[in-house]
Image (spheres, grey):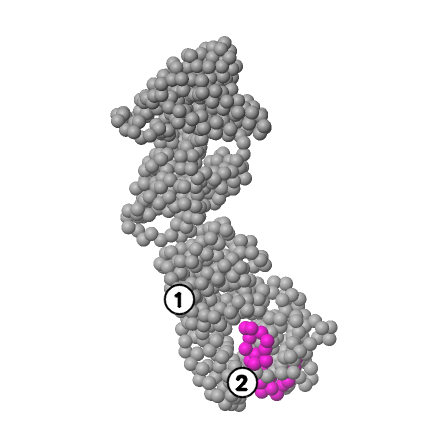
């Protein structure tokens, strides 16, 4: 039979008509009888084949091989001598092909069916049928009084019409779905197999299919819940013992298993370890249980609680599926903890903290979202860049936090750099959840770029930022580290709280500035008090952070402590600026004049700026040059204040010049000293230019707009002038100041 629909229909009709004809013309006593044991049943069936013209067999390949030699002459007599027919359905494998070929030569028509779908039956002239008791086709009353010996199955023979018709129905159904023997033999001999992907939902079919696949496997890779391990133990343990026995003899790759190991299932894990399985513990398993070898892939989303057999099973021999899940398993295996170590920790009562490192971005994403979903009290985020916030908003992390705040009153706090890209989302969160979601801004992290997530102060996930220019989460992140270690998690909480308090102080000051712009008198009073009060906590913060930094050996912890120090120093500079403003406005800015070399001050300021550029890595293509460093220029002035002005002007030039040059020059003439700083940056904003040297003149997110006002006051206190302008070529700006040349200055000419 070729598989064509019309030919198949004719073939089935021919068999069906033969069965019906025999039923209609045969007159026999109706009887049903029981035979104990498969061997006796098959022997009785073959003995009865002496006088039949038409026979129909559905038997396993093993049974076919064992019985075909004595049956061969009977078949030849039935088909060749008496003009009868014989139809056989069996599972054709490499070791049964020779028997199939001999039977085909004797006149039998044979088809192949997978052993998992095979239902054993033998029908002669539609008058005698044998069935395994596993699939009874008669009422329970027919066998209820039969004593069954352990290890023996009960077969039913019957000439009852309903039983024979049921056998006929099953046989025809199997014959329709079976593959012609010639096709199957070609597949086996050429090493090919039909590609399939299907979902099994019949429990018996699932069991038979898994038994067949495991039985021929030389390796098994499994990732399952403890329920899946219990299911394997209850149903297929002997087959896994067989795989591992072959492995010990150097055949195949054995069994590797990934599961979550705890107090409840450690004994079961030990059972599999004792027979040679390799097992690793993984806290966060994928949502799907799966098993894979070199040929087949199985998967189910059911947890198989208590070892229950799954009700649906996805199975496939598609190479793309098999290769894909082999790769997934290997990635998960890298992150697992050896089962023996895990069990030892459990038995010794060691604190069962998990630390997992994920190389796979997709795995990190899954764990990330799962952790946020588990939040019951608090979620803390630190985003190193605005792009990091946007990417993680896209994958749903922020939405999950929003849902937790809405449905479970979870407190969500976020630290991130300010940026217009995320402004709309941030405003939405602030307006809709003013008491449960709070967002504060920090400087963009240049030294350490990692997203930090802490949930309920019990779990943390740190995700390195590999490439911030990427638009998707998976492309942007590198290694990720999960931990539920109390000490580790609380260290990240401490970092978060330190940054949070600094932003609180900084936000308080900025808010005060906004109010004091409108209330000048209140402004002066508050700034004076606030600056003096801020001086007290800043120094201990710097001192403690520096001490912790010197004792810390972990690179990542050092980086985060550097962030604390940097922000504290920023706050310290702001405090000093505020005090300078107070002195300027109260006309109490004192100058401590001395004679010093201005060139040395400029060179030192340039060196400090270059160090900061190298550390920040934000201006890697920037060139900073002193045009005439050879000539010493001595001046009588306040050395600290002049250094403050030069450093401030250099800092501004660098801030607005990402690429290009910043040149500084100092020239001594008869009556004055002129210092100029020329950059090729973005220039001075047209809105800022008219009020360039007034207080709070800035459009920068991080600046306060006090530096130029203070610089102007210092220069004017020395009797000099300061100015700024955009360059004529529309590239960058020039800031310059002049100071009167004293007698000592002129002597250097």
Location of mark 2 (residue): 517
Residue 618, x across and y down, in percent: 58, 64
**Residue at horizontal 50%, vertical 30%?**
177
Location of mark 1 (residue): 409
Q: Position of residue 266 (x, y in %)?
A: 31, 44
Q: Secondary structure at mark 2?
A: helix
Above or below: residue 319 compared with residue 639: above
Nearer to me, 151 or 541: 151
Q: Is residue 159 visible?
A: yes
- Element under disc 1: loop
Residues tagged 2 and 1 counted as in contact (Cβ below 8 A)? no
The tag earlier along the polypeptide, 2 or 1, is 1
Q: Which part of the image, by quadrant, shows the C terminus?
A: bottom right
Between marks 2 and 1, how big is the CA–CA gap?
38 Å
Q: Which residues are magenta?
A: 696-724
Nearest the viewer among 410 and 207 is: 207
Which image quadrant for residue 254? top left
In this rendering, is residue 313 above or below 407? above
Instruction: Give the residue displayed 44% in from the left and 84% down from the top.
Output: 529
Tell me what residue is drawn at x 30 percent, y 27 percent: 143
**Quarter placement of the N terminus:** top right
């Amino acid at each position: 039979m070729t598989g064509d629909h019309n030919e198949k229909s004719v073939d089935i009709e021919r068999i069906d008509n033969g069965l019906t004809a025999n039923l209609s013309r045969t007159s026999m006593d109706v009887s049903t009888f029981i035979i104990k044991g498969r061997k006796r049943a098959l022997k009785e069936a073959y003995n009865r084949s002496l006088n039949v013209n038409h026979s129909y067999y559905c038997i396993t390949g093993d049974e076919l091989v064992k019985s075909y030699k004595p049956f061969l002459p009977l078949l030849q007599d039935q088909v060749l001598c008496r003009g009868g027919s014989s139809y056989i359905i069996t599972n054709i494998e490499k070791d049964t092909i020779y028997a199939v070929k001999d039977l085909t030569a004797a006149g039998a028509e044979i088809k192949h069916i997978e052993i998992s779908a095979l239902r054993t039956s033998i029908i002669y002239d539609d008058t005698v049928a044998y069935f395994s008791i596993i699939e009874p086709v008669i009422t329970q009353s027919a066998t209820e009084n039969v004593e069954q010996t352990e290890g023996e199955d009960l077969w039913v023979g019957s000439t009852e019409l309903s039983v024979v018709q049921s056998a006929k129905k099953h046989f025809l159904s199997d014959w329709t779905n079976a593959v012609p023997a010639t096709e199957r033999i070609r597949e086996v001999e050429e090493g090919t197999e039909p590609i399939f992907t299907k979902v099994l939902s019949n429990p018996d079919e699932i069991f038979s299919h898994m038994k067949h696949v495991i039985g021929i496997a030389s390796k098994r890779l499994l990732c399952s819940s403890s329920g899946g391990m219990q299911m394997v133990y209850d149903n297929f343990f002997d087959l896994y013992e067989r795989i591992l026995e072959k492995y010990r003899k150097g055949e195949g790759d054995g069994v590797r298993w990934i599961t979550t190991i705890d107090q409840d299932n450690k004994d079961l894990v030990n059972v599999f370890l004792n027979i040679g399985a390799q097992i690793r513990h993984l806290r966060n398993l994928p949502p799907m249980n799966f098993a894979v070898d070199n040929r087949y892939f199985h998967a189910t989303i059911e947890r198989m609680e208590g070892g229950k057999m799954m009700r649906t099973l996805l199975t496939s021999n598609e190479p793309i599926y098999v290769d894909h899940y082999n790769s997934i398993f290997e990635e998960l295996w890298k992150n697992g903890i050896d089962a023996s170590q895990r069990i030892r920790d459990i038995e010794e009562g060691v604190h069962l903290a998990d630390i997992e490192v994920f190389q796979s971005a997709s795995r990190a994403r899954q764990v990330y979202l799962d952790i946020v979903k588990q939040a019951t009290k608090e979620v803390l985020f630190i985003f190193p860049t605005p792009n990091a916030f946007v990417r993680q908003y896209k994958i749903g992390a922020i939405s999950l936090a929003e849902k937790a705040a809405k449905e479970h009153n979870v407190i969500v706090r976020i630290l991130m750099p300010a940026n217009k890209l995320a402004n709309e989302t941030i405003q939405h969160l602030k307006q809709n959840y003013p008491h449960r979601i709070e967002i504060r801004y920090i400087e963009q992290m240049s030294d350490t770029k990692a997203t930090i997530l802490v949930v309920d102060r019990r779990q943390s996930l740190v995700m390195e930022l590999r490439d911030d220019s990427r638009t998707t989460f998976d492309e942007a992140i590198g290694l990720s580290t999960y931990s539920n270690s109390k000490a580790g998690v609380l260290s990240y909480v401490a970092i978060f709280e330190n940054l949070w308090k600094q932003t609180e102080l900084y936000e308080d000051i900025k808010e005060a500035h906004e109010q004091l712009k409108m209330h000048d008198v209140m402004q002066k009073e508050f700034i004076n008090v606030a600056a003096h009060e801020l001086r007290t906590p800043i120094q201990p913060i710097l001192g403690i952070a520096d001490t912790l930094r010197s004792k810390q050996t972990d690179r990542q912890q050092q980086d985060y402590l550097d962030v604390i120090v940097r922000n504290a120093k920023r706050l310290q500079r702001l405090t000093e600026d505020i005090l300078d403003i107070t002195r300027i406005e109260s006309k109490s800015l004192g100058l401590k004049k001395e004679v010093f070399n201005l060139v040395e001050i400029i060179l030192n300021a340039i060196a400090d700026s270059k160090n900061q550029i190298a550390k920040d890595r934000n201006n890697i293509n920037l060139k900073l040059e002193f045009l005439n460093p050879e000539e010493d220029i001595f001046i009588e002035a306040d050395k600290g204040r002049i250094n403050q002005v030069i450093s401030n002007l250099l800092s501004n030039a660098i801030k607005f010049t990402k690429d290009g040059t910043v040149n500084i020059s100092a020239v001594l003439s008869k009556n004055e000293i002129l210092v100029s700083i020329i950059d090729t940056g973005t220039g001075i904003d047209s809105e800022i230019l008219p009020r360039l040297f007034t207080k709070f003149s800035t459009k920068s997110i991080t600046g306060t707009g006090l530096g130029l006002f203070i610089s102007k006051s210092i220069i004017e206190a020395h009797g000099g002038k300061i100015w700024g302008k955009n360059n004529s070529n529309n590239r960058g700006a020039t800031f310059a100041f002049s100071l009167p040349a004293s007698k000592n200055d002129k002597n250097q000419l």
